[in-house]
């Protein structure tokens, strides 16, 4: 049966008709989901029942290879025992809510800055698939912005100015903004990656602004001038009317295209209430048909 998409925002984001994604293996449905991602850049699937293994397997079926270096995993072992499964929770290794001054909590607070997953790596992240297991009784939402629409809204002069620019992304930079300190060894591990400021999405040909809190400088530009432009572009892209705010329910799987969106977590009483999400992110490389057994990306 064909999927149906209910728009959640005038520009992007849609909720997909009910289905159990852990059982979706046929290439036709996977193709429809990819086509939906091309159009909406963010899809919401309600009432999913994934084990970690099913979550990982679905992500591979949908989008090929998985990213294993999307965050602090480069420095510290994940509580979940699989580096492709990111622990988006406020829980320590014993499953307890973090103390306010826990270093991992402070590091995670960087997710409240507008960003796109793993832009500080090469290859970066493509699709992130974020699954809600435990949500608090207070709002603990995630906001998303459509970076294709942000590009489209730029003046022709600005588009011409941005064409060909390259940006250095570093997670050390986004954490420094918040006063977080890394050792020299950690900084070396997290030294970052360079990506074009404007990306062209291969299947649709649409252009997208590829920026984030991780964006530390524009290559060959004076540092302050580049940072001011990056700040201006983030402000431009995230005006309230351009943002979709997702209110999590247990069982939600939200898939977002990191090439076409930015996101940020919103604050909540995170030293009081448990919140447990899991994220799997695909690697932004050519789609591996053999591995996924489905149609090409
Ligand atoms: Fe993120």
Image: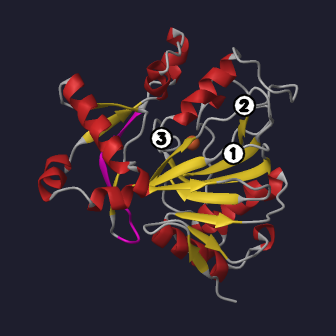
**Residue 259 x/y as whole percent:** 44, 54
User: Is the residue marked 3 within 8 Å of ligand 1, measured from its CB?
Assistant: yes
* Residue 203 placement, left or right of 272: left
CA distance separating discs 3 and 1: 20 Å
Residue 202 magenta: yes
Location of ligand 1 given as a quarter of the image: top right
> Residue at position x 43%, y 33% from top?
214
User: Is the residue marked 2 within 8 Å of ligand 1, measured from its CB?
Assistant: no
* Residue 231 placement, left or right of 126: left
**Residue 27 x/y as whole percent:** 65, 79
**Residue to which mark 3 is pinned:** 115
From this viewpoint, is residue 243 visible? Answer: yes
- Give SS at disc 2: loop
**Residue to which mark 2 is pinned:** 270
| Among numbered discs 3 and 2, the one appearing first in the sequence | 3
| In-front residue for pair 55/102 | 102
């Amino acid at each position: 049966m064909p999927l149906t998409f209910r728009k959640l925002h005038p520009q992007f984001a849609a909720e997909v008709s009910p289905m159990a994604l852990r059982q979706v293996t046929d290439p036709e449905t996977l193709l429809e989901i990819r086509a939906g991602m091309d159009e909406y850049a963010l899809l919401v699937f309600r009432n999913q029942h994934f084990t970690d293994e099913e979550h990982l397997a679905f992500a591979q079926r949908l989008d090929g290879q998985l990213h294993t270096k999307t965050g602090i995993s480069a420095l510290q072992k994940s509580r979940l025992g699989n580096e492709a499964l990111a622990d988006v929770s406020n829980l320590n290794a014993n499953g307890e809510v973090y103390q306010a001054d826990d270093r991992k909590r402070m590091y995670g607070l960087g997710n409240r800055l507008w960003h796109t997953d793993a832009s500080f790596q090469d290859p970066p992240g493509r699709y992130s698939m974020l699954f809600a297991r435990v949500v608090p009784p207070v709002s603990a939402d995630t906001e998303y912005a459509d970076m294709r629409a942000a590009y489209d809204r730029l003046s022709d002069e600005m588009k011409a100015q941005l064409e060909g620019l390259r940006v250095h992304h570093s997670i050390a930079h986004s954490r420094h903004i918040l006063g977080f300190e890394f050792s020299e060894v950690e900084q070396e591990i997290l030294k970052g990656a360079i990506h074009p400021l404007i990306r062209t999405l291969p299947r649709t040909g649409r252009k997208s602004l590829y920026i984030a809190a991780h964006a530390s400088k524009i290559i060959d530009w004076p540092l302050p001038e580049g940072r001011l432009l990056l700040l201006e572009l983030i402000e431009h892209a995230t005006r309230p009317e351009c943002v979709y705010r997702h209110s999590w329910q247990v069982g939600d799987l939200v898939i977002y295209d990191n090439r076409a969106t930015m996101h940020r977590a919103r604050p909540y009483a995170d030293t009081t209430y448990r919140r447990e999400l899991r994220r799997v992110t695909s690697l932004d490389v050519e789609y591996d048909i053999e591995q996924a057994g489905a149609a090409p990306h």
